[in-house]
C-alpha cells in the first residue's frame, strides 16, 4: 500500500485528488494540509511514501518545503502538483529533490500513475513540461563531461548513467549490460558519490545538462537505489 499526504491550499483541489487516489486500490491518503509548515509536520508525523505538494502555498513555497525535506534527508518522495509550468520553477524543484512534476490540468488523468512512479523511486514529468525541463537543462550546461569530475566516471559508470537517464530501471540496465542487478546498484551508488547527488532524478538531470544523453521524458522508470 502506497501512503500519501496531500498539501494544497485549495480545498476543492484536495478533494478532487483525494477522490482519484481513494479509487486506487494500492494507494492510501493519510492526511491533508494547506500550508508549507503543515506539510513538514505531516511528513514528520506520518512518514508517507509520497507527498503531493503544491508550489504556491500561503507561507512556505513548495521549493522551500522540498529543500527542507532534502536537508532532513527525509525518504518521502515529493511529487509537485501545480498550474505553473515555467522551466525555472520546474527545474528548481527537481534540483531540490522533487521526484516529479504534474500539472493540475492533467492531474486527474495521471495522478495515480505519477504517485506509483514516485513511490517506486522513479521520475515523473508531465509531457507538457518535460521538453521545457530538458531544453533548460541542456541550455544551462556549463560544466564539462564525465571525465572532468574530481573523481571521473569509469566507462562502465558512464554507460549505466546514460541508461539510467533514459528511464531504465536497475533490472533493465543489468539485462542491457549483461551484468547482475547488484553490480548495477554498486555502479549507481558510485555514480551518486562522484556526482554528489542522492537521487536518480538528480543523476539523470546531470547527465542531461552535460549532454551525455538527449531525451525528452514523459515519465520515468527505475527502482531507486536503496
Image (spheres, grey):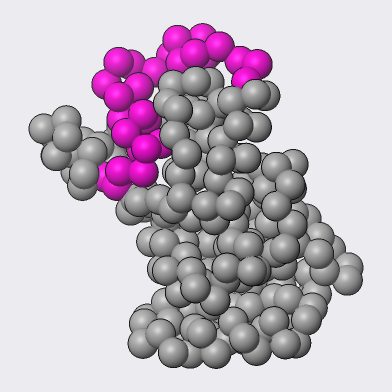
Which residue is located at x 49 percent, y 55 percent? 124
User: Residue at the location (29% across, 47% down)?
Assistant: 169
The residue lying toward the viewer, choosing from 97 and 108, is 108
Pinpoint residue 111: horizontal percent, then vertical percent. 51, 72
Asked if residue 79 is positioned above or below residue 89 in the image, the reply reads below
In the displayed structure image, the side of residue 192 where residue 32 appears, left or right: right
Quick check: 4 above or below 105?
A: below
Of 142 and 20, the residue lying toward us:
20
Residue 90 visible in the current orientation: yes
What segment is highlighted magenta in the picture?
A: 141-170
Which residue is the extreme one toward the right?
59
Q: Position of residue 85 (x, y in %)?
A: 70, 52
- Is residue 3 inside the magenta stretch? no
Which quadrant, please, contains the N terminus? bottom left
Q: Nearer the viewer, residue 74 or 133?
A: 133
Q: Quadrant of residue 25?
A: bottom left
| Front-most of residues 9 and 83 | 83
Residue 92 appears in the figure: no
In percent of the image, x 49 and y 20: which residue is there?
211
Q: Residue at x 30, y 24 (%)?
A: 159
Provide residue 17's location: percent of width, then percent of height: 59, 82
Q: Is residue 149 magenta?
A: yes
* Occupied quadrant, residue 179: top left
Number of numbered discs overlaid on the protein picture: 0
Amino acid at each position: 500500500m502506497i501512503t500519501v499526504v496531500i498539501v494544497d491550499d485549495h480545498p476543492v483541489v484536495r478533494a478532487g485528488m483525494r477522490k482519484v487516489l481513494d479509487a486506487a486500490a494500492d494507494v492510501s491518503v493519510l492526511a491533508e494540509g494547506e500550508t508549507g509548515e503543515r506539510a513538514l509536520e505531516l511528513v514528520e508525523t506520518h512518514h508517507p511514501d509520497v507527498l503531493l505538494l503544491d508550489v504556491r502555498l500561503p507561507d512556505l513555497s513548495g521549493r522551500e518545503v522540498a529543500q527542507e525535506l532534502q536537508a532532513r534527508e527525509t525518504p518521502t518522495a515529493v511529487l509537485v502538483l501545480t498550474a505553473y509550468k515555467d522551466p525555472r520553477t520546474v527545474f528548481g524543484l527537481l534540483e531540490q529533490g522533487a521526484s516529479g512534476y504534474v500539472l493540475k490540468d492533467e492531474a486527474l488523468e495521471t495522478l495515480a500513475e505519477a504517485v506509483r512512479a514516485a513511490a517506486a523511486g522513479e521520475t515523473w514529468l508531465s509531457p507538457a513540461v518535460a521538453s521545457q525541463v530538458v531544453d533548460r537543462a541542456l541550455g544551462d550546461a556549463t560544466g564539462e563531461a564525465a571525465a572532468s569530475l574530481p573523481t571521473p566516471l569509469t566507462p562502465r559508470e558512464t554507460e549505466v548513467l546514460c541508461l539510467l537517464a533514459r528511464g531504465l530501471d536497475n533490472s533493465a540496465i543489468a539485462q542491457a549490460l549483461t551484468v547482475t542487478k547488484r553490480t548495477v546498484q554498486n555502479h549507481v551508488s558510485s555514480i551518486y558519490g562522484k556526482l554528489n547527488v542522492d537521487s536518480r532524478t538528480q543523476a539523470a538531470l546531470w547527465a542531461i545538462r552535460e549532454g551525455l544523453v538527449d531525451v525528452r521524458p514523459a515519465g520515468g522508470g527505475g527502482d531507486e537505489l536503496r
